[in-house]
Amino acid sequence: MLYNVYVSAQPMLFDLEPLVAVPRSVGQALVTKRRVSQILTKATGMLKSLDFTLNPYVGCSFACSYCYAAFFQPDEVKVRDWGYWVEVKENALELLRRESRLAGSHVMVGSVTDPYQPLERTTGLTRSLMEYMASVRPQPRIRIQTRSPIVVRDIDVLLRFEKLTVGMSVTTDDDATRKRYEPSCASIEQRLKAVRALADAGVRVTLSLAPLLPITDIARLAEMIRESGAERFWTGYFHPGTRKFAAGTRENALVLAKEDGWNLEAYIETVTRLKKLVPELVSRDFE
Ligand code: SF4
Protein backbone atom coordinates (compact mmCIF):
# COMPACT_ATOMS: atom_id res chain seq x y z
CA MET A 1 0.00 0.00 0.00
CA LEU A 2 1.30 3.45 -0.90
CA TYR A 3 0.52 6.68 0.88
CA ASN A 4 1.03 10.37 0.29
CA VAL A 5 3.73 11.66 2.61
CA TYR A 6 2.41 15.20 2.80
CA VAL A 7 -0.97 14.74 4.37
CA SER A 8 -1.45 17.73 6.61
CA ALA A 9 -3.51 16.83 9.67
CA GLN A 10 -3.45 16.67 13.42
CA PRO A 11 -1.26 13.85 14.76
CA MET A 12 -3.13 10.60 14.31
CA LEU A 13 -1.41 7.25 14.24
CA PHE A 14 -1.46 5.70 10.73
CA ASP A 15 -4.47 7.57 9.42
CA LEU A 16 -2.94 7.92 5.95
CA GLU A 17 -4.64 8.43 2.62
CA PRO A 18 -3.74 5.89 -0.08
CA LEU A 19 -1.77 7.26 -3.02
CA VAL A 20 -2.14 5.94 -6.53
CA ALA A 21 0.72 7.58 -8.42
CA VAL A 22 4.37 6.94 -7.65
CA PRO A 23 5.96 10.29 -6.72
CA ARG A 24 9.61 10.88 -7.40
CA SER A 25 10.09 14.58 -6.98
CA VAL A 26 11.51 16.81 -4.30
CA GLY A 27 9.49 16.66 -1.11
CA GLN A 28 7.50 13.56 -1.98
CA ALA A 29 7.99 9.99 -0.92
CA LEU A 30 6.18 6.70 -1.01
CA VAL A 31 5.07 5.65 2.43
CA THR A 32 4.39 2.08 3.49
CA LYS A 33 3.96 0.35 6.83
CA ARG A 34 6.37 -2.25 8.09
CA ARG A 35 6.47 -4.57 11.11
CA VAL A 36 9.93 -4.85 12.64
CA SER A 37 11.41 -7.36 15.07
CA GLN A 38 13.07 -4.82 17.40
CA ILE A 39 12.89 -1.09 18.01
CA LEU A 40 16.05 -0.47 20.04
CA THR A 41 19.37 -1.05 18.27
CA LYS A 42 22.63 -1.29 20.20
CA ALA A 43 24.65 1.87 19.54
CA THR A 44 28.02 1.30 17.89
CA GLY A 45 30.81 3.22 16.14
CA MET A 46 30.61 6.99 16.54
CA LEU A 47 27.56 6.53 18.79
CA LYS A 48 29.06 3.94 21.11
CA SER A 49 28.91 6.28 24.11
CA LEU A 50 25.13 5.78 23.96
CA ASP A 51 23.24 2.57 24.71
CA PHE A 52 20.70 2.41 21.90
CA THR A 53 19.46 4.09 18.76
CA LEU A 54 15.75 4.32 18.04
CA ASN A 55 14.45 5.08 14.55
CA PRO A 56 10.64 5.30 14.19
CA TYR A 57 10.93 5.19 10.40
CA VAL A 58 13.06 3.46 7.82
CA GLY A 59 14.05 5.90 5.09
CA CYS A 60 13.73 9.68 5.13
CA SER A 61 11.85 12.03 2.84
CA PHE A 62 14.32 14.85 3.49
CA ALA A 63 16.55 13.23 0.87
CA CYS A 64 19.70 15.16 1.79
CA SER A 65 22.23 14.78 -1.01
CA TYR A 66 25.00 13.75 1.39
CA CYS A 67 22.99 11.33 3.55
CA TYR A 68 25.06 8.31 4.54
CA ALA A 69 22.08 6.57 6.19
CA ALA A 70 21.11 5.30 2.74
CA PHE A 71 24.03 2.89 2.80
CA PHE A 72 22.62 0.97 5.73
CA GLN A 73 20.02 -0.37 3.32
CA PRO A 74 20.79 -3.82 1.96
CA ASP A 75 18.60 -3.22 -1.10
CA GLU A 76 20.39 -1.38 -3.93
CA VAL A 77 17.17 0.07 -5.30
CA LYS A 78 16.40 1.58 -1.90
CA VAL A 79 19.88 3.06 -1.76
CA ARG A 80 19.40 4.54 -5.23
CA ASP A 81 15.93 5.89 -4.39
CA TRP A 82 16.85 7.14 -0.93
CA GLY A 83 14.67 10.10 0.00
CA TYR A 84 11.70 8.94 -2.08
CA TRP A 85 10.39 6.21 0.18
CA VAL A 86 9.65 5.88 3.89
CA GLU A 87 8.52 2.88 5.90
CA VAL A 88 6.56 3.47 9.10
CA LYS A 89 7.44 1.00 11.85
CA GLU A 90 3.84 0.30 12.71
CA ASN A 91 4.60 -1.92 15.73
CA ALA A 92 7.25 0.45 17.16
CA LEU A 93 5.23 1.45 20.23
CA GLU A 94 4.15 -2.11 20.95
CA LEU A 95 7.81 -3.24 20.87
CA LEU A 96 9.00 -0.33 22.97
CA ARG A 97 6.42 -1.11 25.66
CA ARG A 98 7.82 -4.63 25.89
CA GLU A 99 11.47 -3.47 25.93
CA SER A 100 13.08 -4.34 29.27
CA ARG A 101 16.38 -2.57 28.41
CA LEU A 102 14.86 0.90 28.03
CA ALA A 103 14.67 2.06 31.67
CA GLY A 104 17.66 4.23 32.63
CA SER A 105 19.38 3.79 29.28
CA HIS A 106 20.80 6.45 26.97
CA VAL A 107 18.93 6.54 23.67
CA MET A 108 19.45 8.46 20.46
CA VAL A 109 16.24 9.08 18.54
CA GLY A 110 16.97 9.54 14.83
CA SER A 111 20.36 8.09 13.91
CA VAL A 112 19.42 6.95 10.38
CA THR A 113 16.15 8.79 9.75
CA ASP A 114 14.68 12.11 10.76
CA PRO A 115 12.11 11.40 13.49
CA TYR A 116 10.39 14.71 12.70
CA GLN A 117 10.25 14.44 8.92
CA PRO A 118 6.93 15.73 7.44
CA LEU A 119 5.18 12.38 7.73
CA GLU A 120 5.42 12.67 11.52
CA ARG A 121 2.76 15.41 11.39
CA THR A 122 0.32 12.75 10.25
CA THR A 123 1.42 9.62 12.07
CA GLY A 124 2.43 11.08 15.44
CA LEU A 125 4.60 7.98 15.80
CA THR A 126 7.68 9.71 17.22
CA ARG A 127 5.44 11.62 19.63
CA SER A 128 3.83 8.40 20.85
CA LEU A 129 7.27 6.85 21.47
CA MET A 130 8.46 9.94 23.30
CA GLU A 131 5.31 9.99 25.46
CA TYR A 132 5.88 6.39 26.45
CA MET A 133 9.58 6.89 27.20
CA ALA A 134 8.76 9.90 29.39
CA SER A 135 6.61 7.61 31.56
CA VAL A 136 9.30 4.94 32.08
CA ARG A 137 11.18 4.83 35.42
CA PRO A 138 14.04 5.27 35.74
CA GLN A 139 13.63 7.53 32.76
CA PRO A 140 15.86 6.99 29.77
CA ARG A 141 18.18 9.81 28.83
CA ILE A 142 17.30 11.03 25.33
CA ARG A 143 19.18 12.64 22.47
CA ILE A 144 17.04 13.61 19.49
CA GLN A 145 18.64 14.45 16.16
CA THR A 146 16.59 16.36 13.60
CA ARG A 147 16.62 19.16 11.07
CA SER A 148 12.88 19.69 11.27
CA PRO A 149 10.95 22.47 13.00
CA ILE A 150 8.13 19.95 13.58
CA VAL A 151 9.96 18.98 16.79
CA VAL A 152 8.52 22.15 18.34
CA ARG A 153 5.09 20.49 18.32
CA ASP A 154 6.32 18.09 21.02
CA ILE A 155 7.80 20.62 23.45
CA ASP A 156 5.23 19.61 26.06
CA VAL A 157 6.45 15.99 25.90
CA LEU A 158 10.14 16.89 25.72
CA LEU A 159 9.80 18.88 28.94
CA ARG A 160 8.69 15.73 30.77
CA PHE A 161 12.23 14.33 30.53
CA GLU A 162 14.84 15.03 33.15
CA LYS A 163 17.69 14.56 30.67
CA LEU A 164 17.00 15.34 27.04
CA THR A 165 18.84 17.21 24.32
CA VAL A 166 17.63 18.12 20.86
CA GLY A 167 20.34 18.28 18.21
CA MET A 168 19.21 20.62 15.41
CA SER A 169 21.18 20.40 12.18
CA VAL A 170 21.97 23.70 10.48
CA THR A 171 24.54 23.11 7.79
CA THR A 172 25.19 26.50 6.20
CA ASP A 173 24.45 30.21 6.57
CA ASP A 174 23.12 30.52 3.03
CA ASP A 175 19.69 29.29 2.02
CA ALA A 176 20.71 29.08 -1.65
CA THR A 177 23.35 26.54 -0.63
CA ARG A 178 20.86 24.77 1.61
CA LYS A 179 18.47 24.43 -1.32
CA ARG A 180 21.14 22.80 -3.48
CA TYR A 181 22.20 20.18 -0.93
CA GLU A 182 18.98 19.78 1.09
CA PRO A 183 16.12 20.93 -1.16
CA SER A 184 13.41 19.12 0.83
CA CYS A 185 14.41 20.46 4.24
CA ALA A 186 13.16 23.50 6.11
CA SER A 187 14.88 26.84 5.59
CA ILE A 188 17.68 27.96 7.88
CA GLU A 189 15.39 30.61 9.33
CA GLN A 190 12.69 28.06 10.19
CA ARG A 191 15.23 25.81 11.92
CA LEU A 192 16.68 28.70 13.91
CA LYS A 193 13.19 29.73 14.96
CA ALA A 194 12.64 26.16 16.16
CA VAL A 195 15.90 26.26 18.15
CA ARG A 196 14.80 29.51 19.75
CA ALA A 197 11.35 28.13 20.60
CA LEU A 198 12.87 25.00 22.16
CA ALA A 199 15.45 26.97 24.13
CA ASP A 200 12.93 29.53 25.35
CA ALA A 201 10.71 26.68 26.54
CA GLY A 202 13.61 25.21 28.53
CA VAL A 203 14.63 22.36 26.21
CA ARG A 204 18.40 21.91 25.86
CA VAL A 205 19.55 22.28 22.26
CA THR A 206 22.80 21.45 20.51
CA LEU A 207 23.41 23.03 17.13
CA SER A 208 24.91 20.50 14.72
CA LEU A 209 26.75 22.21 11.90
CA ALA A 210 27.27 18.91 10.20
CA PRO A 211 28.05 18.19 7.58
CA LEU A 212 29.22 21.76 7.23
CA LEU A 213 28.43 22.98 3.70
CA PRO A 214 29.96 25.98 1.90
CA ILE A 215 29.65 29.15 3.96
CA THR A 216 29.01 32.56 2.41
CA ASP A 217 29.70 34.81 5.39
CA ILE A 218 31.62 33.43 8.38
CA ALA A 219 30.86 36.43 10.61
CA ARG A 220 27.14 36.01 9.89
CA LEU A 221 27.34 32.30 10.70
CA ALA A 222 29.13 33.07 13.97
CA GLU A 223 26.40 35.52 14.91
CA MET A 224 23.75 33.00 13.95
CA ILE A 225 25.35 30.39 16.23
CA ARG A 226 25.73 32.78 19.15
CA GLU A 227 22.19 34.11 18.96
CA SER A 228 20.54 30.74 18.35
CA GLY A 229 19.82 29.88 21.97
CA ALA A 230 21.61 26.53 21.66
CA GLU A 231 23.85 25.50 24.57
CA ARG A 232 26.45 23.71 22.54
CA PHE A 233 27.72 23.72 18.98
CA TRP A 234 29.67 21.18 17.01
CA THR A 235 30.69 20.78 13.42
CA GLY A 236 31.99 18.10 11.09
CA TYR A 237 32.94 17.55 7.47
CA PHE A 238 31.15 15.03 5.29
CA HIS A 239 30.93 11.64 6.92
CA PRO A 240 34.33 9.87 7.02
CA GLY A 241 34.91 8.08 3.74
CA THR A 242 34.27 4.44 3.21
CA ARG A 243 34.05 2.40 0.08
CA LYS A 244 30.30 2.89 0.09
CA PHE A 245 30.57 6.66 -0.12
CA ALA A 246 31.69 6.49 -3.71
CA ALA A 247 28.13 5.75 -4.82
CA GLY A 248 24.48 6.76 -4.56
CA THR A 249 23.20 9.89 -2.89
CA ARG A 250 26.55 10.57 -1.38
CA GLU A 251 27.95 11.06 -4.84
CA ASN A 252 25.36 13.79 -5.45
CA ALA A 253 26.84 15.80 -2.62
CA LEU A 254 30.39 15.23 -3.78
CA VAL A 255 29.51 16.55 -7.24
CA LEU A 256 27.98 19.67 -5.70
CA ALA A 257 30.95 20.09 -3.37
CA LYS A 258 33.36 19.85 -6.28
CA GLU A 259 31.42 22.54 -8.14
CA ASP A 260 31.64 24.70 -5.01
CA GLY A 261 35.35 24.04 -4.38
CA TRP A 262 34.30 22.64 -1.00
CA ASN A 263 36.83 20.09 0.23
CA LEU A 264 38.50 19.14 3.50
CA GLU A 265 41.03 21.97 3.23
CA ALA A 266 38.29 24.56 2.64
CA TYR A 267 36.34 23.09 5.56
CA ILE A 268 39.36 23.27 7.89
CA GLU A 269 40.10 26.84 6.87
CA THR A 270 36.46 27.84 7.44
CA VAL A 271 36.23 26.16 10.82
CA THR A 272 39.57 27.64 11.93
CA ARG A 273 38.23 31.13 11.15
CA LEU A 274 34.87 30.33 12.71
CA LYS A 275 36.45 29.10 15.93
CA LYS A 276 38.17 32.45 16.38
CA LEU A 277 34.68 33.95 16.62
CA VAL A 278 33.06 31.02 18.43
CA PRO A 279 35.82 29.31 20.49
CA GLU A 280 33.32 26.87 22.05
CA LEU A 281 32.65 25.31 18.65
CA VAL A 282 33.80 21.69 18.66
CA SER A 283 34.98 20.04 15.46
CA ARG A 284 35.17 16.28 15.24
CA ASP A 285 37.67 16.34 12.37
CA PHE A 286 40.90 18.05 13.27
CA GLU A 287 41.33 18.60 16.99
S1 SF4 B 1 17.50 14.29 7.48
FE1 SF4 B 1 19.15 12.93 8.13
S2 SF4 B 1 18.41 10.87 7.68
FE2 SF4 B 1 17.11 12.29 6.54
S3 SF4 B 1 18.04 12.39 4.50
FE3 SF4 B 1 18.86 14.11 5.73
S4 SF4 B 1 20.77 13.32 6.64
FE4 SF4 B 1 19.57 11.54 5.90
Image (cartoon, grey):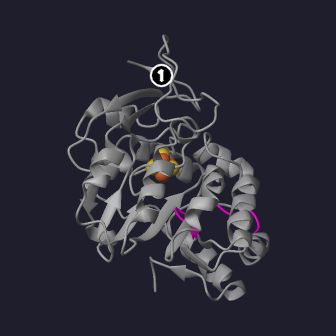
Image: magenta residue range: 207-217
The answer, for residue 255, to whether it is visible in the render is: yes
Magenta stretch holds residue 216: yes
Element type at mark 1 = strand
The location of residue 274, given as percent across then percent down, is 67, 79
* 6 horizontally vs 50: left or right: right
Q: Nearer the viewer, residue 135 or 211?
A: 135
Q: Quadrant of the N terminus?
A: top left
Q: Residue at x 77, y 67 (%)?
A: 217
The location of residue 285, given as percent across then percent down, is 44, 76
Identify whether 10 is placed above or below 206.
above
Magenta stretch holds residue 240: no
Q: Quadrant of residue 117?
A: top right
Identify whether 110 is placed above or below 251.
below
Q: Which residue is mark 1?
A: 3
The location of residue 238, given as percent across then percent down, is 46, 61
* 47 horizontally vs 253: left or right: left
Q: Quadrant of residue 278?
A: bottom right
Q: Nearer the viewer, residue 76 or 154?
A: 154
Q: Outermost residue toward the top?
A: 20
Tally of numbered tags: 1
Q: Residue at x 45, y 77 (%)?
A: 284
Identify whether 197 is placed above or below 186.
below
User: What's under tag 1, amino acid-wise?
Assistant: Tyr
Badge 1, how many Cα within 10 Å: few under 14, some, many 20+? many
